[in-house]
Amino acid sequence: MIPFCLVSPECVLEQCMKFNVTKPNAAPVNVSLYYESLCPGCRQFLVFQLVPTFIMLQDIMGIDLVPYGNAQEKEDQGKYIFTCQHGEDECLGNMIETCLLSMLGINAFPVILCMESGVDVLKAAQPCLGVYFPDTKWDSVMNCVKGDEGNKLMHQNAVKTNALKPPHEYVPWITVNGEHTDALQDKAMDSLFNLVCSLYKGDKPPACGQGLKKKTNSYCMN
Amino acid sequence: MIPFCLVSPECVLEQCMKFNVTKPNAAPVNVSLYYESLCPGCRQFLVFQLVPTFIMLQDIMGIDLVPYGNAQEKEDQGKYIFTCQHGEDECLGNMIETCLLSMLGINAFPVILCMESGVDVLKAAQPCLGVYFPDTKWDSVMNCVKGDEGNKLMHQNAVKTNALKPPHEYVPWITVNGEHTDALQDKAMDSLFNLVCSLYKGDKPPACGQGLKKKTNSYCMN
């Protein structure tokens, strides 16, 4: 099991241990993002706010990504057929990201960031996986995407999205510790970083600007 | 000319205009990073601090990347021969990133982030370029890397690094608005995000947690 660090397994062991010296002493702030893979506002929030914030505050926050958004499903002979707001490509993007999350857990985040920040979300998927998980075969992702596993996982995303209270009116739709209000949504869209720092009840980490200094930094001496 | 937004040219036009609604009214905080491509501490600072901070604070900050670090050069018949702390591979990584910066300007940042956060910095270079600049040929980068252009550019990095006052003692070596002190280095390593927010003399942007609300957010309505 690789400790997560938004970088590759190889660097993680060395770098995470030095980075994560903050010992969290309160529950993490959990941010859930209900989104769809080709929605510009979703890509913007994911690339400009959610992932950079998580990179810096991973000691005190959790993220749940739910790629489904404004999609719809209908059941047909025990399987589900999905229709997506931005067409077939979006359904495929949602499914790839869902399978990545299922296979890699939070280690899928750098891959998804890479996809969502690229020129073409779908074309970026395979090279992005290769950059972070060179030993994971693209075929294993596509087996999930095209098979029963992906179909089942996407249905779970549908159930989760449709169970939102209040129901989502748009995407990106954000919940913080399971709660959605207009005020939380606005604050998250304005500065998720500051929202997470302000909501965290434990000792603030250095990244929040009020914490203890990190004990070690890693330098390459001349 | 593409306005920079740490995402692809395609998304930029749409997304940047919505994101960059802060009108800067003071000089940006300029952060320079003297580093080398395979140094773990450099990769850590670049991936965990510098780029995420820049993604969120690009309205009020500038970045200068100088890949050279603890390398050394000697002149031989009008060309320079470089020796790098982490060997030949590091020299190649430094050179690729130098050529990318020369060719793409700040638009090279997502490519360099992708490389430095990947499992293998060198192997990641070509796929990372493809994700963000599918129309830029890898050969054009390698022409720079192997030719006089790259040699000249790397010599400029050497001159710039060797001109540091005080001289650098290790990498990552950080200057803020051209200045290096132990205190600035420590603050930058602890939380560059908070350092930049605190040093910026103009109205703080929303990301700093004190600014005006952004006027528009981009949603995909149901």
Image (spheres, coloured by chain):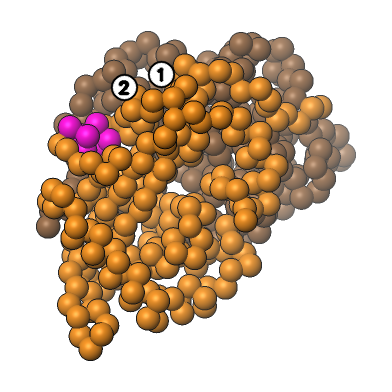
Chain colours: A orange, B brown
Report the magenta residues as a range.
A183-189
Would you call the spot at circle 2 few (<14 residues within 10 Å), some (14-19), or many (20 or more)?
A: some
Closer mark to the observer between disc 1 and disc 2: 2
Check contact, mark 1 vs mark 2: CB within 8 A. yes
| Residue drawn at point x = 29 percent, y = 18 percent | B210
Dot 1 amino acid type: Cys
Q: Distance between the Cα atoms at labels 1 and 2?
A: 9 Å
Q: Magenta part mainly helix, strand or loop?
A: helix
Query: B207 and B153: which one is in front?
Result: B207
**Chain letter belonging to callout 2:** B
**Image quarter in which the C terminus of chain B is found:** bottom left
B20 vs B30: above or below: below
Would you call the spot at circle 1 few (<14 residues within 10 Å), some (14-19), or many (20 or more)?
A: many
Q: Which residue is mark 2?
A: B209
Left or right placement of residue A43 versus residue A214 in this view: left
| Residue drawn at point x = 68 percent, y = 52 percent | A10
Instruction: State the image quarter where residue B132 is shown.
Output: bottom left
Query: A27 and A2: which one is in front?
Result: A27
| Residue drawn at point x = 30 percent, y = 49 percent | A33
B142 vs A140: above or below: above
Q: Which residue is mark 1?
A: B197
**Image quarter in which the N terminus of chain B is found:** top left
**Chain letter belonging to callout 1:** B
Left or right placement of residue A131 versus residue A57 in this view: right
Dot 2 amino acid type: Gly
Q: Are marks 1 and 2 on the same chain?
A: yes
The answer to whether residue B106 is seen in the rendering is no
The tag earlier along the polypeptide, 1 or 2, is: 1
